[in-house]
Amino acid sequence: MLQSLIAFVGAAFLIAMAPGPSTVVIMRQSMRSGRRAGLVTTLGNETGVLVWGVAAAVGLSALLAASQIAYDALRIIGAAVLVYFGAKALWQARKRGADQTETGAGASADAATEEVRADWSPWRCFRLGLVTNFANPKAGVFAVSFLPQFVPQGAPVLWMLLAFSAMWALIDLVWYTGVVWLVSAARRLMNRPTVRRRLDQVSGVVLVGLGLRLAAEAR
């Protein structure tokens, strides 16, 4: 049991550190709206992780692994969501650049501050994290293939899978909390209008690229 737990914790941390759509979205929310927004977005993402894990434990995620049609449908929907988020970020970057040109740096900075205040909504941030996680069908397939590997022989499978699901979400939460704190610490620099515009452009391109890759790839 102890060996299984140690192996699981190590593997879960490595998985958490691998960058993906959730990383981009959480970092962007932390830069745009501050630490609280980043943490609430993280909670939404981890709720999605927990749901995938529980679904795998009770066998629902096996549908994605067994049915090509179900997997492809969720893959296309997820790709569309990521492309939408990326296009929205690119549009905001373009709008910010136009506003900065028209009003000047000082007024642009004030507008950016007002935008940050308007953008902060706990439910909006939570929903963003949750939807981003659900937009990746690989998480469901991965949960089916990943979690059962660490169940010790003779242990109650369902309860062990549920426990591992909770631990997976908790480990993911610990990692992304650290990411949020690091990004928030550098937020004063990143909150400059020009820097924020570049960051929106980069995150937008990355999200669109991830969405297109998800749409194009075969399982």
Image: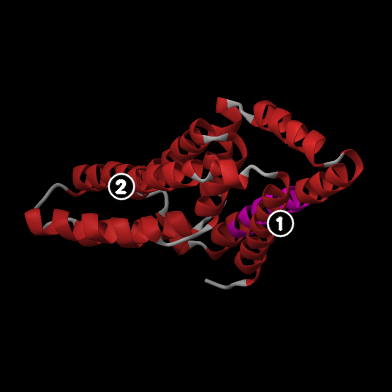
In front of the other: 149 or 197:
197
The answer to whether 207 appears left or right of 129 in the picture is right
The answer to whether 173 appears left or right of 190 in the picture is left
Q: Tag 2, which secondary structure?
A: helix
Please tell me whether residue 114 is drawn above or below residue 144 in the rendered image. Answer: above
- The residue segment tinted magenta is 75-90
Tag 1: amino acid? Gln
Q: Residues within 10 Å of mark 1 (few under 14, many from 20)?
A: many
Tag 2: amino acid? Ile
Q: Residue at position x 40%, y 56% from top?
A: 62
Q: How many marks?
A: 2
The answer to which quarter of the image holds residue 51 is top left
In front of the other: 132 or 193:
193
Q: Residue at position x 80%, y 49% from top?
A: 91
Q: Tag 1, which secondary structure?
A: helix
Residue 92 x/y as whole percent: 77, 46
Please tell me whether residue 24 is drawn above or below residue 210 in the rendered image. Answer: above
Q: Residue furthest right?
A: 102
